[in-house]
Amino acid sequence: MILTKGEYCQFSLRTRVQLLREYGQLEFERTFEHIAVRIFALHDFYVEVVYNRLKGEVERAEPVNFINMMHLYEDSSGL
């Protein structure tokens, strides 16, 4: 299955998460207290997933320009 960013954004949050489970590749992960942030590659774009560990739920799964954010994930000692 090949999707564009626009097509991906048309789906519900639940479906977006399911698509990442089936077709996405985990690239990076960071944890901030009770929030886990993960970046997945999905075809030709990246998706940032914000997971609230206290609530046990995904709060957001949105396409991002990962190239502009890469420095946040490369150096875990910086935050």
Image: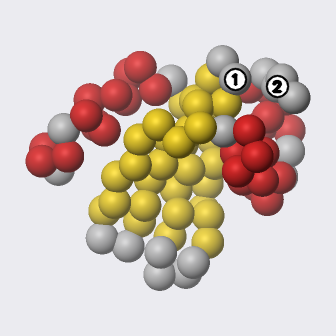
| Residue under label 1 | 43
Image coordinates of residue 48 in percent, x first then y, are 54, 42
Q: How many marks?
A: 2
Vertical position of residue 68 compared to residue 79: above or below: above
Q: Quadrant of residue 42?
A: top right
Query: For the N terminus, which image quadrant?
Result: top right
Vertical position of residue 5 compared to residue 36: above or below: above
| Residue under label 2 | 3
Image coordinates of residue 69 in percent, x first then y, are 37, 29
Q: Residue at the location (59% across, 31% down)?
A: 41
Image coordinates of residue 11 in percent, x first then y, are 85, 45
- Camera-nearest residue between 62 and 30: 30
- Camera-nearest residue between 59 and 3: 3
- Amino acid at pointer 2: Leu
Residue 8 shown left or right of residue 73 in the figure: right
Q: Residue at the location (59% across, 38% down)?
A: 25
- Judge whether residue 16 can be spotted in this image: no
- Indicate which disc, 2 or 1, sits on the residue closer to the N terminus: 2
- Judge whether residue 70 can be spotted in this image: yes
Q: Dot 2 lies on which element? A: loop
Image coordinates of residue 32 in percent, x first then y, are 31, 62
Q: Dot 1 lies on which element? A: loop
Circles 2, 1 touching at the beta carbon (< 8 Å): yes
Vertical position of residue 59 compared to residue 57: above or below: above
Q: Residue at the location (26% across, 29% down)?
A: 71
Q: CA distance from mark 2 to mark 1?
A: 7 Å
Residue 4 shown left or right of residue 63 in the figure: right
